Image (cartoon, rainbow, N blue to C red):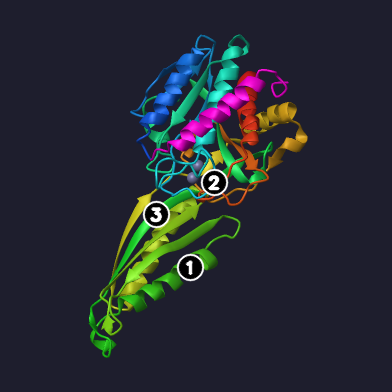
Amino acid sequence: MIMDDGSWNVIEPWMIEIRRTIHRHPELGLETPETQKLIEVTLDELGISHSRPIAHGVKAILAQNKPGPALLLRADMDALPILEDNDLPFKSEISGRMHACGHDCHTAMLLGAARYLKEHESELRRPVVLMFQPAEEGPGGALPMIEAGILDGVGEACMVHVSSDLPKGVIGLREGPAMGACDDFVLTVLGRGGHGSAPHDGVDAIYVAASIIQAVQGIVSREQDSFDPLVISIGTIHGGFRENVIPDRVDMTGTIRSMSPKTRERAVRRLREVAESVAKTHNARVELVIDAGYPPLVADVPWSRRVKSILTEELGQEAIRDIAATLGVEDFAYVAERVPGLCLNVGIVGDRFTTGLHSAGLIVDESGLKAGAVGFAAVALHS
Ligand SMILES: [Zn+2]
Ligand SMILES: [Zn+2]
């Protein structure tokens, strides 16, 4: 069993130390030079060859001379613009930045697996590509790395993500549609200003905006098959500047989350139709700008089942759980669109757990990281 191998007595604390170093120095978006340097120095120490497909991404390869197709293992590297609020001795040293989504853990787990696999390189039956990518939290690092050729010769892929819904030591899997597609939007209502005492002389943009918000929810509740998920959320709304003035414009932003291409296309189209027609009814206008985000993450079913049986064999039945889909997004979806892909959701809930991912108070139980690294290693050695 990989899990019981004595070399983890060395690899596990080493991996946790790497995680803490990355945690202290969070970097954002596509700008991850320090994290990249740490990964490259570590790979050099391990004797694993690597390259830079994009400015701040790293590709490494093991068992390069074995016959393909290769397996790709992916970790992301970027943090979030959040002010860390906990008492960890290794908390962020950069004010306003925090590894609150656990990408520090992902990079550490992949390096932990890399160290183990380097020790067992002769047992690998095919090449293993390690993908360290920036900008998962936006604007996206997976697609530029794919365009730079990281999937050339790759047959299947796996990623890890920590899960604040699962206890440490447990890995959650979801086959088929697993995570959502995202389309963010800016919706502006344009009316005509006037005196608050004489609304009939103007076109009240706040009233029109309210009507649009109501009507848009009808797209979800009255037009959508309830077995095909769709969410439309207005996240910000700004309008008006004085109690007795009819405002001439309202600015709103929001997000559309869906799971199927058909629904995604329809939701965007209907948002535009509904907003425009409601505005027209009230003699107003709208401007709608859609920012198309990541596609849905669909985990290939046969590949998911193969990985599940490998992980069950390695970690035991009680450590593997089927989990529900979410409308959160993940840019590994671009990988899984091109080759069979799957996410290993690694439990990190322990005694000190307080809040979930993307929270300033997040405390990861680091003893959960070993399961993720072992999971990666098991898939590499047995698939
Ligand atoms: Zn995140
Ligand atoms: Zn994340």
Q: Are marks 2 and 1 in contact (CB under 8 Å)?
A: no
The residue wearing badge 3 is 184
Q: Position of residue 218 (x, y in %)?
A: 49, 69
Badge 2 residue CB within 8 Å of ligand 1: no
Image check: 380 left or right of 215? right
Amino acid at dot 3: Asp
Can you see residue 3?
yes
Residue 207 pos. (x, y %): 36, 78
Query: Which residue is depicted at the point 37% across and 57% down?
Result: 185
In the foreground, 231 or 261: 231
Residue under numbered circle 1: 217
Q: Main secondary structure of the magenta part?
A: helix
Q: Earlier in the sequence, mark 2 or mark 3?
A: 2
Badge 3 marks a residue whose secondary structure is strand
Camera-nearest residue between 164 and 195:
164
Splitting the image into 4 quarters, where does residue 320 fall? top right
Q: Is residue 4 magenta?
A: yes
Give the side of residue 16 with respect to residue 268, left or right.
right
Amino acid type for the residue under numbered disc 1: Gln
Q: Position of residue 232 (x, y in %)?
A: 47, 61
When the figure is inspected, residue 124 is found, relative to residue 286, above or below; the finding is above
Residue pointed to by mark 2: 87
Spatial separation of the CA atoms under disc 2 and disc 3: 35 Å
Q: From which residue to which does the magenta span run?
A: 1-28
Give amino acid for label 2: Asp
Near mark 3 (Cα within 10 A), the count class, few <14, some 14-19 or many ≥20, is many
Categorize mark 2 by other alpha carbons within 10 Å: few (<14), some (14-19), many (20+): few
Using the image, determine if residue 163 lies above or below residue 371.
Answer: below
Name the quadrant of the C terminus: top right
Q: Residues within 10 Å of mark 1 (few under 14, many from 20)?
A: some
